[in-house]
Amino acid sequence: MDDGGLADALRRAIGGDEVAFAQLWRSLQPPLLRYLRVVVGDAAEDVASETWLQAARDLHRFDGSPPAFRVWLFRIARHRGLDERRRAARRREDPQEPAEHDATGAQVRDVVYDVLEGSDTEWALGLIASLPPDQAEAVMLRVVAGLDVAQTAQVLGKRAGAVRVASMRGLRRLAAHPEVQARAAERRRRAGPATEPARPAQRV
């Protein structure tokens, strides 16, 4: 649903229209669920339900545009996700974070986007979930949920600069991951040789 349709559904949902609220759910549940799969793993469905229950309860107090609604909804989801992570931490030890990796080159973002968009969703989400939590959340909100830096900063309660750093570090880790590199190499192999020699990238 584009922002025009979302704005109309949002206006009617705020007024108590249940059909319009269902339209909001259908439009935003998929990216919300993918975000929560990275944040809370198998508890994503439950946390998403808690998120929408709170949204339904508090929607009459919301006043803003569709982009503002996305930020509002994902902030609710993040808070519910943090609650779930605290509950989970009391039940079991937190998984160990992977060692730091780095990657160089001007096309880090392009490599990661290309591989993740052309790969199995479960594999991609699992890979992102292996990042440190701050990086995983930044990558999910920027790449999967489609929020810009300012909106992501609002959801996470961080400065825009910190979001940019976390996002880029996460993308670099992903680009350096052996599985990502292997899939990128396989995609290049399937594409075949270029018709003319590649030229060095121009830096600006």
Image: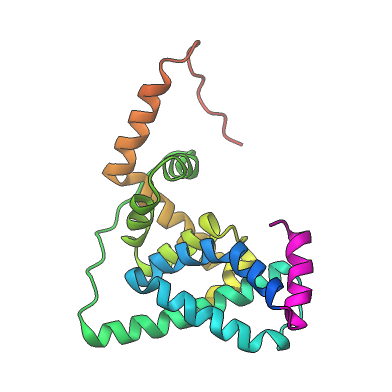
Residue 2: horizontal and vertical position, in percent? 72, 56
Tell me how many marks there are. 0
Residue 7 covered by magenta stretch = yes
Give the residue at x 58% y 70%: 153
Q: Nearer the viewer, residue 58 or 116?
A: 58
Give the residue at x 78% y 82%: 15
Q: Nearer the viewer, residue 22 or 134?
A: 22
Q: Is residue 129 left or right of residue 20?
A: left
Magenta extent: 1-17
Taking the view exactly as shown, the residue that stands out farthest to the front is: 19
Give the residue at x 31% y 60%: 130
Give the residue at x 54% y 66%: 29
Most frequent secondary structure within the magenta stretch: helix
Residue 86 sits above or below residue 126 on the image:
below
Residue 33 covered by magenta stretch = no
Q: Is residue 131 left or right of residue 96?
A: right
